[in-house]
Image: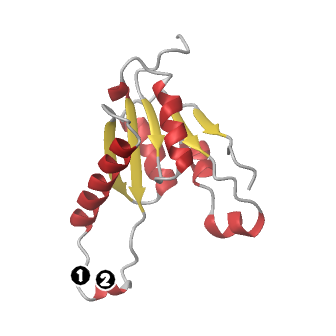
Amino acid sequence: MSWLPKKTVLVPIDFSDPSVSAIRTALELVEEPANVHVLHVLEEIEHSAPAVLFGDFDDAARKVRAGEFLSEFLRRHELTGLTELVQVGNPGLKIADYAKESSAELIVMPSHGYHGLRRILLGSVAERVLHHAECPVLVLRREDKD
């Protein structure tokens, strides 16, 4: 099996600048932009959240709004022809699950590089993906020194 080009590359994004870099990296690894699957995962809302308790919460509408935001984000960065997806759940697990479902050959994702207490409190999506994904994962190094 050849390293390049890939048939399907998954890029999970959080709308940060490093997400744009990850998409551009993935585009270098495929023949067609449609082979890059851009996935944004919405965190689940706790059942005790005020919006849920007062009935102002609609998960389907939330996914639609996130999908519209995703499309606009990609257009704003002149990234067209990609496969766009929005899912709800635990980001690390959803990314690994979608990679398996879509037969992705590679996951390309940025690392936010949190250290110490911040990493313990926030967890690491990249680490969870590395642990659960069945395909190779390319975690891009942060470009800033922050």
Q: Pinpoint residue 20: horizontal percent, then vertical percent.
A: 49, 42
Figure check: 52 above or below 65: below
Q: 138 or 140, which lies in front?
A: 140
Q: Tell me: 108 left or right of 121.
A: left
Q: Residue at image x 41%, y 42%?
A: 77
Tell me: 20 left or right of 55. Answer: right
Taking the view exactly as shown, the residue that stands out farthest to the top is: 2
Tag on residue 56?
Answer: 1
Question: Who's the residue at 47% across and 15% down the image?
Answer: 5
Return the x and y of residue 109 as percentages of the image width and height. Answer: 55, 41
Query: Residue at the location (63% across, 62% down)?
Result: 123
Whether residue 106 appears in this view of the structure is no
- How far across and how far down the image is residue 40, in percent? 40, 51
Tell me if residue 81 comes above or below residue 90 in the rendering. above
The answer to whether one can see residue 35 in this image is yes
Q: Amino acid at mark 2?
A: Ala
Q: Quadrant of residue 131?
A: top right
Q: Position of residue 7 (x, y in %)?
A: 40, 21
Amino acid type, residue under disc 1 in the picture: Asp
- Residue 8 sits above or below residue 56 on the image: above
- As drawn, the label of residue 65 is none
Q: Residue 74's quadrant in the figure?
A: top left
At 30% from the left and 82% from the top, the residue drawn is 52
Vertically, is 51 above or below 11? below
Of mark 2 and mark 1, the one earlier in the sequence is: 2
Distance CA(mark 2)–CA(mark 1) = 5 Å
Image marks 2 and 1: residues in contact by CB distance under 8 Å: yes
Element type where label 2 sits in the image: helix
Q: How many residues crowd around disc 2 within 10 Å: few (fewer than 14), some, or many (20 or more)?
A: few
Q: Which residue is mark 2?
A: 51
Q: Quadrant of the C terminus?
A: bottom right
- Please state which of residues 17 and 86 is positioned toward the viewer in this rendering: 17
